[in-house]
Image: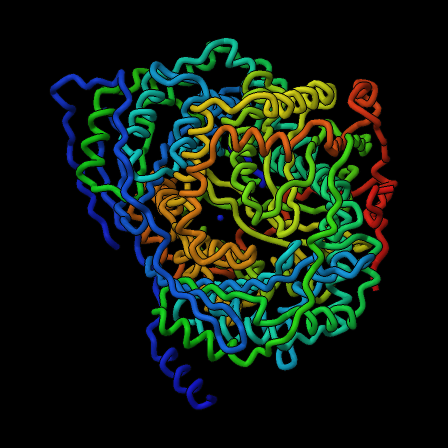
């Protein structure tokens, strides 16, 4: 059992010296002084754009004889056809399930035989193919990744198999209170906009997906000019670019329609939705609204706000709900970034009888946040975490690859990884308060409660208009779940 | 282009087979019994520090299940110079991450932080080892948090109690019978005097191993470790552990229960030997052949060909005392759990009946090779591997020497362990079925 679970894997020098304790008494009363850390830079990498428009990042890492590949395409569930949630995820899922020249099993056997991995998935705004291999088999990883990317067969048998898997998986999700709370919250704040789609589809949308939908999606949106490949590992930069050009160079460029990130509804008024799960022993709570775009200059202010409110176990929400009251195993606040308006929300769970008490405390903390400036020491702590955690985020190849492709996804600019710490450092208490007043409110929020409704809905009087929906009656294809 | 590709491929063919790099380390013991393991890695200015206390839920006294884990939470509730909850604050304000976990055999406290904080973190860890100070009020409020954790992990999620049911039935006398989180009744029965006794018995330097991996100079790190830990006295109380021996299981145990789960689930546990036993290596290779990757036998049979299962896995839980080898199924909508159980068991029996192919054996070993390489990239992964070798194996060198034991596994070894352990009399199976059966429509 871990203490926190955040939602948001023969040289011996055994010198058995008998060490003697120090003769002089040690002062343990005072904490030792911490000297400043030298300047830490993102490891050197090279970026090149191939003639077909594919952006390639190459970064050398020789700690172990391994290579990580990560290809990000700027297309996700935000491009799902209306009423056909899940097409982007489904298309990605089928990439490594057979190509023009290889069956699904041949692909699996090929990559497994060398101890490697090859996965593909889509989320809201991107599709990602990732592969890992020992250096001795990196060539095969490139070969299987590009074949899956460019030549997927979308065989009818594989589509049916994937549909059955998806339906079983969604059936299981639909009984998981944590999943339901997250999905319902996103659905409600975004209304009809694709950002509210369930990324993996619904029990009604999945059976409607046809082979033509997948072929069309792949032909329309998979293109090198909206994609970036990060190669991080035990290869020279020159070798990495050679491999990229050889395997990805013939992928054809095309014009790709852009998603609508403009017409996203704003949260207005308070909406309380209770999803009744009669066998629940806890209530899952989500409170929040839409917020700034990832590229908005206010993003850093809202980020600091979310950190102070609930970015860690030391945040205000966890201190109040867990440490002071013992109401929950954890209470956090988080930003889900999007190219368009993202979301800002708080999350916790508590035993059924404490539902109203926990919700009240949560709303109180959000309200307080808007009333006065964050004290200097709290602000400093938040900034020092956000800035200080940089070295931890650049340690292993996967994280390095992911940081590079994220910069590409949100179009943050080549100097972003160099400058964002300085930008964070300039955030002031007044900036945070202004952003909180504009972007965070206990009034214009969606509140989702998943639990045993009969035992707590009466306590909710005064929280606003409450809609109770039995879990069996949820309509995930409708923006209001009805 | 094609010729170039061929030439390039030839170059790679000639490249030697990649072998994971070993983890170099130093091991020292202070006079008070504290074991110290250090690994220098200057690639990024970060350090991971882990404190392994050799006490877990198997060391709890009767009527106090869940106590080792509750105690883990209390280690964040303040000591002589650190206020309650301040430990995490100091680490996170530095940009670091701090957490802890409790298992059957050990309780591990760890933090990853920028390299300039090493001395301060050592000072903090020494403070709570020597002077933990938990108030009655903090004890009671943290107990509520732990009860809430039980609801979050075990009681509210649909399949949360599957393993509690399995262990409760697979074991008769060994303390692995209860899962780490314990029962609400036992948590309620715990007192602050239990806290003191547990602390004085198990949280002593001679029952702890400090592992540090990362960007430091070894001499400097050892000097600080001596400075803050050398004068903490050895424990005065004898460390007593349960010597319960689980009697061999003679008959299959089968528990069929009706529960409101979305899809039927099946989990079986076979008694196997402890971590580090010679048979544990062929069992790991066997689990790779059974369920590692989409080309594995169980995936191919149950998920791909027969389309019976949403998820199907097999693998051993290797711990200090003998534990279980699992096989697990979550059924597809409309699929029969009996058919799933039959197909799953057939794969285990097949391993005992016929040798695996050369290619499968090579594939399983390549997976180990990759796991060693990908699993030892970060300082946290390396410290974790060192701590496990030192405490669970009581042989730090095994962090590197085990690799060759995996590579030496033969087809005959796999058949032998499959015959020895994958027997129905040695199995405990738990079946969870929704009240109305598996009603989901079977898809085309």
Q: Nearer the viewer, residue A42 or B6?
A: A42
**Is residue A458 or residue A362 the one in the foreground?**
A362
Residue at the image point whose x is 49% and y is 34% from the top? B103
Numbered-mark total: 0
Q: Nearer the viewer, residue A165 or A301?
A: A301
Q: Residue furthest left?
A: A23
The answer to whether residue B271 is left or right of residue A21 is: right
Q: Look at the picture and state if B156 lies above or below A108.
A: above
Estimate the x, y position of residue A240 in percent, counting from the top left. 40, 71
Could one spot residue A1 in this view of the protein? no
Q: Residue at x 39, y 86 (%)?
A: B7
Q: Position of residue A439 (x, y in %)?
A: 64, 35
Asked whether the viewer can see residue B67, the reply is: yes
Q: In the depicted view, which residue is nearer to us: B141 or A14?
A: B141
Q: Residue at x 20, y 28 (%)?
A: B226
Q: Pinpoint residue A459: horizontal percent, then vertical percent.
A: 79, 18
Q: Is A243 placed above or below A337 here? A: below
Q: Quadrant of the C terminus of chain A?
A: top right
Q: Is residue A364 left or right of residue B51?
A: right
Give the colour scheme of this rendering: rainbow
Q: Position of residue A286 (x, y in %)?
A: 69, 33
Apparent side of residue B264 relative to residue A410 in the rendered image (left or right) = right
Q: Quadrant of residue A234?
A: bottom left
Residue B97 appears in which quarter of the rendering?
top left
> In the figure, is residue B128 to the left or right of A152?
left
Relative to A111, residue B280 above or below: above
Q: Give the quadrant of residue A10.
A: bottom left
């Amino acid at each position: 059992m871990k203490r926190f679970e955040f939602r948001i894997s023969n040289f011996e020098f055994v010198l058995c010296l008998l060490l003697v304790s120090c003769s002089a008494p040690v002062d343990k009363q005072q904490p030792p002084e911490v000297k400043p850390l030298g300047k830490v830079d993102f490891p050197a990498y090279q970026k090149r754009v191939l003639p077909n428009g594919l952006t390639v990042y190459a970064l050398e890492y020789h700690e172990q004889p391994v290579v990580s590949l990560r290809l990000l395409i700027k297309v996700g569930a935000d491009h799902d056809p209306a009423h056909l949630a899940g097409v982007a995820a489904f298309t990605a899922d089928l990439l490594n399930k057979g190509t023009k020249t290889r069956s699904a099993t041949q692909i699996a056997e090929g990559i497994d035989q060398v101890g490697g991995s090859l996965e593909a998935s889509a989320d809201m705004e991107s599709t990602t193919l990732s592969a890992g291999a020992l250096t001795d088999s990196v060539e095969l990883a490139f070969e299987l990744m590009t074949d899956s990317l460019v030549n997927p067969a979308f065989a009818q048998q594989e589509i049916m198999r994937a549909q059955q898997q998806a339906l079983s998986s969604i059936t299981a999700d639909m009984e998981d209170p944590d999943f339901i709370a997250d999905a319902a919250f996103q659905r409600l704040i975004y209304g009809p906009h694709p950002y509210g789609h369930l990324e993996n589809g619904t029990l009604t949308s999945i059976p409607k997906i046809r082979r033509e939908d997948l072929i069309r999606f792949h032909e329309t949106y998979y293109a090198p000019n909206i994609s970036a490949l990060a190669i991080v590992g035990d290869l020279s930069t020159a070798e990495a670019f050679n491999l990229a050009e050889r395997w990805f160079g013939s992928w054809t460029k095309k014009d790709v329609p852009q998603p609508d990130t403009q017409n996203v509804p704003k949260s207005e008024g308070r909406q309380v939705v209770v999803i009744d799960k009669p066998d629940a022993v806890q209530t899952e709570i989500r409170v929040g609204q839409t917020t700034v775009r990832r590229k908005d200059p206010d993003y850093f202010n809202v980020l600091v706000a979310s950190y102070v409110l609930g970015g860690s176990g030391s945040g205000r929400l966890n201190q109040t709900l867990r440490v002071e009251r013992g109401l929950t195993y954890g209470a956090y606040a988080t930003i889900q970034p999007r190219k368009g308006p993202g979301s800002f929300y708080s999350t916790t769970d508590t035993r059924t009888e404490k539902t109203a008490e926990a919700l009240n405390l949560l709303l109180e903390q959000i309200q307080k946040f808007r009333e006065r400036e964050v004290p200097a020491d709290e602000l400093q702590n938040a900034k020092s975490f956000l800035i200080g955690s940089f070295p931890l985020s650049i340690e292993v190849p996967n994280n390095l690859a992911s940081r590079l492709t994220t910069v590409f996804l949100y179009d943050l600019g080549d100097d972003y990884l160099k400058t964002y710490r300085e930008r964070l450092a300039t955030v002031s208490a007044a900036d945070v308060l202004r952003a909180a007043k504009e972007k965070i409110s206990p009034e214009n929020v969606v509140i989702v409660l998943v639990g045993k409704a009969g035992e707590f809905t009466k306590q909710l009087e005064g929280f606003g208009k409450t809609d109770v929906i039995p879990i069996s009656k949820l309509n995930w294809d409708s923006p209001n779940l009805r | 282009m094609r010729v170039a590709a061929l030439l390039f491929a030839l170059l790679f063919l000639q490249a030697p087979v990649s072998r994971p790099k070993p983890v170099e380390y130093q091991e020292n013991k202070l006079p008070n019994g504290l074991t110290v393991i250090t690994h220098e890695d200057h690639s990024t200015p970060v350090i991971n520090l882990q404190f392994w206390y050799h006490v877990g839920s198997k060391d709890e006294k009767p009527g106090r299940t869940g106590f080792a884990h509750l105690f883990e939470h209390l280690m964040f509730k303040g000591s002589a110079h650190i206020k309650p909850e301040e430990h995490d604050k100091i680490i996170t304000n530095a940009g670091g991450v701090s957490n802890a976990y409790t298992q059957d055999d050990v309780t591990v406290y760890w933090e990853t932080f920028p390299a300039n904080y090493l001395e301060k973190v050592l000072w903090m860890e020494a403070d709570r080892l020597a002077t933990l100070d938990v108030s009655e009020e903090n004890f009671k409020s943290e107990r509520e948090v732990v009860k809430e954790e039980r609801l979050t992990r075990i009681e509210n999620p649909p399949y949360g109690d599957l393993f509690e049911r399995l262990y409760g039935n697979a074991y008769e006398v060994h303390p692995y019978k209860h899962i780490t989180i314990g029962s609400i009744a036992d948590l309620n029965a715990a007192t602050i005097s239990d806290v003191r006794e547990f602390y004085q018995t198990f949280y002593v330097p001679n029952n702890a191993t400090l592992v540090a991996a990362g960007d430091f100079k070894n001499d400097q790190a050892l000097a600080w470790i001596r400075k803050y830990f050398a004068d903490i006295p050895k424990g005065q109380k004898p460390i007593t552990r349960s010597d319960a021996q689980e009697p061999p299981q003679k008959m299959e145990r089968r528990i069929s229960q009706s529960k409101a789960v979305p899809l039927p689930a099946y989990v079986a546990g076979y008694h196997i030997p402890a971590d580090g036993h010679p048979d544990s290596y062929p069992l790991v290779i066997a689990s790779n052949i059974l369920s590692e990757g989409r080309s594995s036998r169980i995936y191919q049979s149950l998920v791909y060909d027969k389309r019976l299962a949403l998820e199907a896995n097999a693998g051993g839980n290797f711990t200090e005392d003998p534990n279980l080898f699992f096989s697990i199924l979550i059924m597809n909508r409309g699929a029969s759990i009996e058919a799933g159980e039959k197909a799953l068991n057939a794969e285990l029996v097949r391993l005992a009946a016929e040798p695996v192919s050369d290619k499968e054996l090579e594939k399983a070993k390549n997976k180990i090779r990759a796991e060693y390489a990908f699993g030892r990239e970060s300082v946290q992964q390396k410290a974790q591997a060192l701590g496990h070798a030192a405490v669970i194996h009581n042989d730090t060198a095994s962090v590197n020497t085990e690799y060759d034991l995996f590579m030496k596994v033969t087809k005959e070894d796999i058949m032998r362990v499959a015959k020895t352990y994958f027997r129905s009399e040695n199995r405990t199976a738990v079946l969870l079925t929704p009240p109305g059966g598996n009603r989901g429509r079977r898809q085309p």
